[in-house]
Image: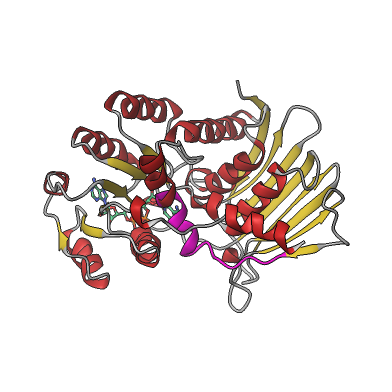
Amino acid sequence: MIERLIEISHACDLSIPVEHRLPIAHVGAGAIVANAHAPAYRKAGLDVRGVYDVDAERAAALAKAWALPRTYASLDELLADDAVRIVDIGVPPMAQSEIIERAFAAGKDVLAQKPLSLTSGEAARLVALADACGRKLVVNHQMRYDEGVAATGEMLRRGWIGDAEAAEMSIDISINWRSWFAESSQLLIWYHAIHELDAIRSWFGTPESVWCTGTSSVVAKGERRIMCGLVYPGRLRVSLHVSTENQTGDTSGRFRVDGSAGAIRGELRRFYKPPLEGPDVLEVHSRTLPTDGWLPYPCTSRWFVDAFIGPMRSLLAWIATGVEPPTSARDNVDTIRLVEALYRSIEFGTVQTLT
Ligand SMILES: NC(=O)c1ccc[n+]([C@@H]2O[C@H](COP(=O)([O-])OP(=O)(O)OC[C@H]3O[C@@H](n4cnc5c(N)ncnc54)[C@H](O)[C@@H]3O)[C@@H](O)[C@H]2O)c1
């Protein structure tokens, strides 16, 4: 049985071959770059040449914290650095398109942050632009590379639980929605639940129709809790509950997938507080392997910071091998269409069909 688990573990590998590594520069030195991109790329052994942020103090602080060789005084200065091959973006989505366009014009490939854009039309335009320029564009949807999520996907693809028939995911966390996030009238789905939705798409593809309701326990511009249902062709139905308003400290993230020949259940330990925070917990109950009851799969890596290696790894592999990765912007357009459908459902109170 251990060989079967090793095959899943190999498929979830996050190591980056030395020959794939190319020099990177960050655009944006805010929370996510400081807390996740920088430590992840350090852990992966990647070569980060410098950082540019409109806030020069933030750029300087990031460069100091991670001993980066330099800061750039402008985006033009960064793009003129011939040593830099990859532009790694961590800015609000409203500022992202222009940076992507200019990076392509300078001959750089791009890892964009999520959401790639706040409309699927703009996301599709960026994909078409990348194709026209011969450039590569990947989106930082690291949840697909979180080990519990990635291993579940591999088990599903190998038919370990037969055909998936029902899945549920419940994320109950606390987020202090600060600064520009709090100003957004559409909040939780664009800036958090898009991860869960993208991960669910990585397991099952895009649903046929969806419904969603969103609310908040505080007077806020945007939704901070959602419940939604995703309807797939055939028997498969998926429910997703995400709240960022946990007030009792017992935060959690759980999922379960039931299939025609077994089930997979997991805890996304990124969402737990110490001492429970850690690598995900995953178990599979399979009649096709078969297992003797619930078999634990031993996750060894974490969302922070390991999973953040995944999207950059996939971009570098795309450049090296020509194989387009699952988190390419082309695939991501459908995640954004799904988000748009859920917001339409919240607005109109009706089931939305995805075409
Ligand atoms: N993948 C994830 O898990 C994850 C988690 C958190 C945030 N994010 C995404 O990352 C992005 C940034 O979030 P954050 O929390 O770091 O925000 P933040 O506000 O902490 O940082 C954003 C940074 O971008 C800089 N900036 C803004 N416009 C710029 C421009 N035109 N050129 C250069 N720098 C610019 C700001 O000065 C700031 O330092 C958001 O789109 C968010 O959705 C992703």
Instruction: Specify the quadrant that holds the N terminus.
Output: bottom right
The answer to whether residue 271 is magenta is no
**Residue at figure coordinates x 48%, y 41% from the top left:** 327
**Residue at figure coordinates x 30%, y 36% from the top left:** 97
Image: 55 above or below 342: below
**Residue at figure coordinates x 46%, y 42% from the top left:** 185
Judged from this view, the residue extending furthest toward the top is 355
The answer to whether residue 307 is magenta is yes
Image: 289 above or below 68: above
Count of labels shown?
Answer: 0
Residue 302's x, y, as percent?
54, 65
Could you tell whether 334 is left or right of 96 in the image? right
Could you tell whether 214 is left or right of 295 in the image? left
Nearest the eye: 22 or 176: 22
Which segment did they paint magenta?
297-312
Judged from this view, the residue extending furthest toward the bottom is 275
Residue 176's x, y, as percent?
47, 62
Image: 86 above or below 284: above
Residue 184's x, y, as percent?
42, 45
Looking at the image, what colour scheme do you see? secondary structure
Residue 281's x, y, as percent?
68, 65
Instruction: Specify the quadrant that holds the C terminus.
Output: top right
Could you tell whether 82 is left or right of 137 in the image? left
Displayed quadrant of residue 230? top right
Nearest the eye: 21 or 254: 21
Nearest the eye: 150 or 98: 150
Residue 113 visible from this viewpoint: no
**Residue at figure coordinates x 45%, y 31% from the top left:** 330
